[in-house]
Image (cartoon, helix red, strand yellow):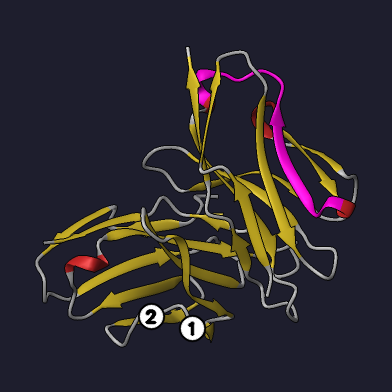
Amino acid sequence: AQSVTQLGSHVSVSEGALVLLRCNYSSSVPPYLFWYVQYPNQGLQLLLKYTSAATLVKGINGFEAEFKKSETSFHLTKPSAHMSDAAEYFCAVSDPGGNTGKLIFGQGTTLQVKP
Amino acid sequence: DAGVIQSPRHEVTEMGQEVTLRCKPISGHDYLFWYRQTMMRGLELLIYFNNNVPIDDSGMPEDRFSAKMPNASFSTLKIQPSEPRDSAVYFCASRLAGAHYEQYFGPGTRLTVT
C-alpha cells in the first residue's frame, strides 16, 4: 500500500535560517506529490505540487521541493524562515491504485520559527 | 470562486445528540472528500464521492456516521448519536477530475461533544 513518511513531527528553526522538512513515499509508479500547509484554525492550503514535469518545483511563499525518484523523496525547503511560516505542513501522494482520486497524507510536521 | 464552504464552523453538542455537518464544494468539481483531524490520529479520510456517488467509505468509523451527496453542490456528514470521542475538526475537500489529484480544502468544522 502507498504510504508517506514525514521525518520529524516537530521542527524548530530560527528566523532567517534554512527550513528543511522531509518527506519520503513508497510507490511502485511515479506518483503526483504535494505539500500542503495548515495555519492555526484553518484548512489545508496547497503549497506546491509535482506532476511529472520539472523535478524542482517552486511554490508559494518562497517554498520549493525537489522530487528525487532514486531516493523516493520530496523534501520541502525554504532558504530563509519567516515568523509567518510557523504552521503545520503535510506531504501527500496520489494513490496509485486505479485512479481512485485519493491522496495519502503524511502525519504532518509542525514548524516552529524562533525570533 | 468562493472555495469550499463548510457550515457550521463550530459546533458544540451534548453526547447522544445528532450532528449534521454541511459542505458545498467548488462549482464544477467532480470529487468530494470528508476528512477528520485529531491530535491522536492526524488527518483521516472518512469517505469520498465521485459525481455524487460514494466510492469509498472504508474510513467511516462506525455506523453512527453517515454521509450523503444529494446533488453536485451539497454534501452532509451526519453523526447519530454523537459521542465525546467524535470531537475533532472535520474537513471537506473537493477536486476536479483530471486535475492531478489536487484537492481544495474548506475551513473545517470544529466539533465538540460534551
Judged left or right of residue A62, residue A69 is right
Q: Reply above or below: A8 against B97.
A: above
Instruction: Kindly identify the residue that appears in the image at 46 percent across and 66 percent down.
Output: B44
Residue type (three-letter) at the residue carrying disc 1: Ser
In magenta, the rendered stretch is A71-84
- In the image, residue A54 lies at what x, y percent? 90, 45
Q: Name the residue under label 2.
A: B67
B60 in relation to A106, above or below: below
Using the image, name the chain to which the residue with label 1 belongs: B
Quadrant location of the C terminus of chain B in the rendered image: bottom left
Q: Does the magenta stretch include residue A83?
A: yes
Q: What residue type is labelled 2?
A: Ala
Q: Does the magenta stretch include residue A47?
A: no
Q: Are dots 2 and 1 on a single chain?
A: yes
Q: Spatial distance from mark 2 to mark 1, Cα to Cα? A: 12 Å
Between residue B74 and residue B37, name the one nearer to us.
Answer: B37
Relative side of A98 to B51, left or right: right
Q: Earlier in the sequence, mark 2 or mark 1?
A: 1
User: Which residue, given by chain and number where applicable, does mark 1 sit on?
Assistant: B58
Say left or right for B102 vs B58: right
Secondary structure under tag 2 reads: strand
